[in-house]
Image: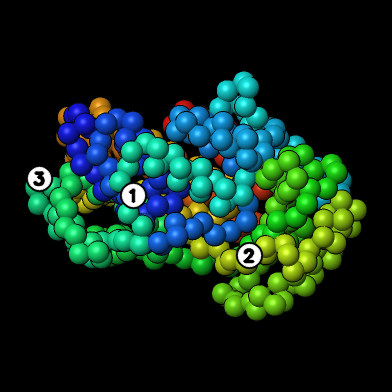
Amino acid sequence: MSLSSQRILVIGGGFSGMSAAIELRKHGAQVDLVEIDPGWRSYGAGISLGGATLRAFRRLGILDAFLEHGNAADDVHLHLPSGHRVATLPTPRIAGADVPGGGAIMRPVLARILAEATRAAGADVRLGCTFTVIEQDADGVQVTFTDGQRRRYDLVVGADGLYSKVRETVFEHAPRPRYSGQAVWRAVLPRVPGIDTATMWMGPQIKPGVNPVSRTEMYLFVTEPSPTREHVDPATFADRLRGLLDGFTDPVLQAIRSQIGPGSQIVYRPLEAMLMPRPWSRGRVVLIGDTVHATTPHLASGACIGIEDALVLADELAKAADVPGALAAFENRRWERCRMVVENSARLGEIETEGGDKEEHSRIMRESLMALAQPV
């Protein structure tokens, strides 16, 4: 199938949606991208990325921009609360021998890099706009938009995230996001000496970690058990976050703790996940990214598998004789990998909240990183 004759709509301007627009444009498709937020903003602090994500960045053409504005490093260090290192998880250099096996970047910075690449690729980006009606027939999809326009497409890609309106509209019985019983805190802090790569401390139930996001900054992430969803007053964020680190005696982590204050860009988020059963498409509408496989952050691979979806979808559309065949092949390639990330991440969270077996935790992380290093 020649993509140069295809008109494709991407609904949602997050990481997976932008990646889909970029890759589909490379194959010659005419791509519209609509994003409901008129400011095309990305919220949050840092985001940790594994080697598989950096491999995807290389294909998208944004790896150099990431290396310039983010931070790349090898290995993940695991410590006890005292600071004693109990393991170092190797991170294979799967993006190339010249690229470290992982890294991190500020989430808004990565969003800006992808947004610039989306526009440069030639996608027609319309901000402050989304769909109101999706109507399908055998040959295409008619979409009505909030700005009053109506356009016809050969394919619609739903990439509008965890609370997807596309999923709700097209799959009326789709599962809802499920709260995990765990919450995460994130903050942005100056880098401290000795923190050159992702580093975590394995407390009985609290797991802090840090990852450099640039030459001068790092981000702190702390997961904690929270049996019910809780609203936390932002005025208490700094005190609450410092308090979570009280039981950790490692001088390095205490130095990090001392830097937490009102200017630390603290974000608190209850962790939710969702794995939608197959199929992920209906007719000529297909879902990708968090829309079908939202994961908790324990494997630092949520963005990765969403971006990979975009690359594989473009691959299969370019290879297949027709859209239905392409969507079936896309789903067959993606299901097991995405299932593994969602379910293994959930198990890691359970071990942490239950104070479970640290050896099992390390084993799951090691096996998952090895699986993610395999070809997509």
Q: Secondary structure at mark 2?
A: strand
Kind of residue at badge 2: Val
**Labels 1 and 3 touching (C-beta < 8 A):** no
Q: Earlier in the sequence, mark 1 or mark 3?
A: 1
Residue visible at 51% across and 42% down in the picture: 113
Neighbor class of circle 3 (other Cα within 10 Å; few <14, some 14-19, many 20+) is: few
Q: Which residue is mark 1?
A: 125
Three-letter residue code for mark 3: Asp
Of mark 2 and mark 3, the one earlier in the sequence is 3
Q: Which mark is residue 133?
A: none
Q: Residue at x 51, y 48 (%)?
A: 111
Residue tagged 2: 267
C-alpha span from label 1 to label 2: 29 Å
Looking at the image, what colour scheme do you see? rainbow
Asked whether 325 or 98 is in front, the reply is: 98
Between the residue at mark 1 and the residue at mark 3, the CA separation in whole angstroms equals 24 Å
